[in-house]
Amino acid sequence: MSYPIAATSSPGRASTSVRTVAMASFIGTAIEWYDFFLYGIASAVVFSKLFFPNYDPTVGTLISFATFAVGYLARPFGGAFFGHIGDRVGRKSVLVATLLIMGVATTLVGVLPTYEKIGIWAPIALLVLRLAQGIAVGGEWGGAVLMAVEHAPPGKRGLYGSAAHMGAPAGLILSTGTFSAFALLPHDAFMEWGWRIPFLLSILLLGVGLFIRLKITESPAFEKMKATGGPARQPVMEVLRHPGNIIRVALLRCIDGVGSSTYSFFGATYAVGHLGFSTSTSVMGNVIGGAVGLISVPLAARLSDRFGRRRVYMAYVAFAIAIVFPAIWLINTGIPAMFWLAMALGLGIANYGQYGSVSAYFAELFDTKVRYSGASIGYQLGGAVFNGTAPLIATGLMAWAGALWPIGVFIALAGIVSLVTASLTPETYKKDLTAQRGVERGRR
């Protein structure tokens, strides 16, 4: 992956800094999403059996997805807590702290005793570690995007911001690829110890991520803000007094939250439980969707730099709505290749295209003094409400109807919510990031 080198007031240093920040955003975010997605995949395949064994399969899956949802519910708190630190102290320190928390929590999942060994304490410990993951991701996203966006020249903020969003499909590929490789073990070996190895590998990735993130320089926009007016005393409270853009960001995430979690996590469960696919065949759909996403994210970001954030975002949302029922038809053929095609369309193009088009959009809606807090809270609030609950709702709809069509309606309605919100959200791609006073009030 390569990014163009941006010229700034200090060409030699800034050129290296921009390139390093883009790579640090990508690699660090990929590692954090590896950890976060790994839990979601294991929720669908392993945790319902090893940590919630006293329930029938459907109830066990629902409870397992409920612990998955807890990670999303914790994310707004992480966004607020680390947003405050990021706006007061700086972006870089938060990026290091959140990566450390995520890596340690994920590694501990890999050594956690099961229900058979310690009873009710097993799911409780799993829940606590999931909370830690959610808090870490809640703080990480804002810093990764802001560091890239605030280092970038105005005409390429979308492209540079997409480095962080490219970490999501990369993390999905890495987590599902690693998990599916160990799923090829004999079933008993996989359920006894094989599923733990992908979690334990997180400690190695943590070392790589910390090495890279410790090398980056602080955001120029943050440094300028400190030198001219100083940080806000209470950035979270300041941005919450005018919550218009926080609400907009959360609602813009409706379709990507519902779509990504439904395709990625419910889709994996459905493929194994209803279509009879092997675990490795099922999760291969996520690998393919993530691979397509590595192309979709920077493409959508570059288009948003040229044609505007809102216009490109709305085009991808419209596509997401249009392909819902064709994707359901492809899934219901029961043919692995058709299932993979559905994942490529719904997850790889529609969902990750939305990610790319909002890479810089959410950051540009807020003033520098409250940008970390505002963007993080809005983004993570949307994740908690939509990403975290979608697998639960999809599983419930499937149990009610015995068919996928209500889930298609669910995704389409989420798309309509996001389209309406986009029509009421200001365009930002030509705004000066150091002169956006009032944008967070939604007055533009």
Image (cartoon, rainbow, N blue to C red):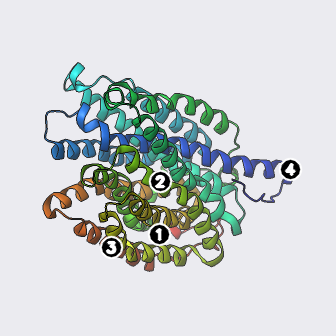
Number of other residues with Cα within 10 Å of mark 1, as a class: few under 14, some 14 to 19, many 20 or more? some
Please give left or right for residue 58 compared with residue 255 in the image. left
In the displayed structure, 313 sits above or below 68; it is below
Q: Secondary structure at mark 3?
A: helix
Tell me, yes or no, whether the two marked residues, 3 and 1, touch with CB atoms within 8 Å: no
Number of other residues with Cα within 10 Å of mark 2, as a class: few under 14, some 14 to 19, many 20 or more? many
Inspect the image, locate mark 1, and give the three-letter code of the amino acid beneath it. Answer: Arg
Tell me, yes or no, whether the two marked residues, 1 and 4, touch with CB atoms within 8 Å: no
Please give left or right for residue 332 compared with residue 357 in the image. left
Distance (Cα) linking label 4 and label 2: 31 Å
Number of the label disc, if any, that sits on residue 325: 3
- Residue that mark 4 sits on: 12
Nearer to us: label 3 or label 1: 3
Q: Residue at x 43, y 32 (%)?
A: 106
Distance (Cα) linking label 2 and label 1: 16 Å
Closer-to-camera residue (107/279)? 279
Q: Residue at x 46, y 28 (%)?
A: 200
- Residue that mark 1 sits on: 441
Return the disc, 3 or 1, that comes first in the chain's sequence: 3
Q: Secondary structure at mark 2?
A: helix
Number of the label disc, if any, that sits on residue 376: 2
Inspect the image, locate mark 4, and give the three-letter code of the amino acid beneath it. Answer: Gly
Distance (Cα) linking label 3 and label 4: 51 Å
Give percent across and percent down for residue 178. 48, 38
Number of other residues with Cα within 10 Å of mark 4, as a class: few under 14, some 14 to 19, many 20 or more? few
